[in-house]
Amino acid sequence: MVILLLTIILTGCGKNAEVRYTVDELLRTPYKAECTARISTNKTVNEFTYSCQRFEDGTYTVDYGDMKITVDSSGAVLSGYGMEKNTGLAEGVLPLLPTYFFENYLADGKVKETDEGYILSCDIQGDNPYRVKGEMTTDKNLIPTVMRIADKDGRTTIDVEITDFHRKAE
């Protein structure tokens, strides 16, 4: 009985450590993904499709039609339609990126294994009442398929379907 209990505990801890290692690797690895996001407010739901990319140097891009947002450690730059504007803060763009979830998951995440893959969950750092809890569904290889961010009342405010996720996009 003791051996069985130890095996269950060690196997569970091993899976959690394996998932954390892979998420940490995904956080640092260049990737490209096609996404469809639904952003919900008290009154509306806006849906849009975009592609996002993480580069080796830690820079991200979000391509939305003819608009491109480039995010780095100094903030965000919006370009398109013959203009370029430094918007400073990237807070509005970051929750659309898988990396946003990865960073929060590594701070205090939990993992649940399912028949199809994994459900990762975490608290979202910061004091934004519209971004309090995060959840990401992955396949068995820990490739993200869905990312959700919920508000303080548990309502989903950001729902991102992630398709065609590829590591090492450069």
Image (tube, grey):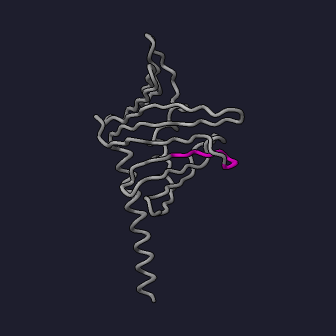
Q: Residue at x 44, y 19 (%)?
A: 66
| In front of the other: 44 or 131 | 44
- Quadrant placement of the N terminus: bottom left
Q: Position of residue 138 (x, y in %)?
A: 44, 53
Say whether residue 152 is left or right of residue 6.
right
User: Magenta segment, which residues?
Assistant: 147-154
Residue 50, how many percent across, how many down?
45, 31
- Against 138, is 71 above or below? above
Task: Residue at 71% x, 36% y: name it.
Answer: 42
Residue furthest top as drawn: 82
Expressed as whole percent of the image width and height from the top left, the position of residue 16 reads 43, 63
Near-viewer residue (127 or 68): 68
Instruction: Look at the image and say whether residue 85 sits in the magenta stretch.
Output: no
- Residue in the foreground of this view, choosing between 71 and 113: 113
Tell me which corner region of the image, top left, top right, bottom left or bottom right, holds residue 46.
top right
Give the quadrant of residue 131: top right
Q: Is residue 13 above or below residue 101?
A: below
Q: From the image, which quarter does the C terminus lie in?
A: top left
Counting labels gives 0
Q: Residue furthest bottom?
A: 1
Residue shown at the point (40%, 65%) measured from the top left: 15
Is residue 149 within the magenta segment? Answer: yes
In the image, residue 51 above or below residue 102: above
Q: Which x, y percent locates residue 156?
A: 62, 45
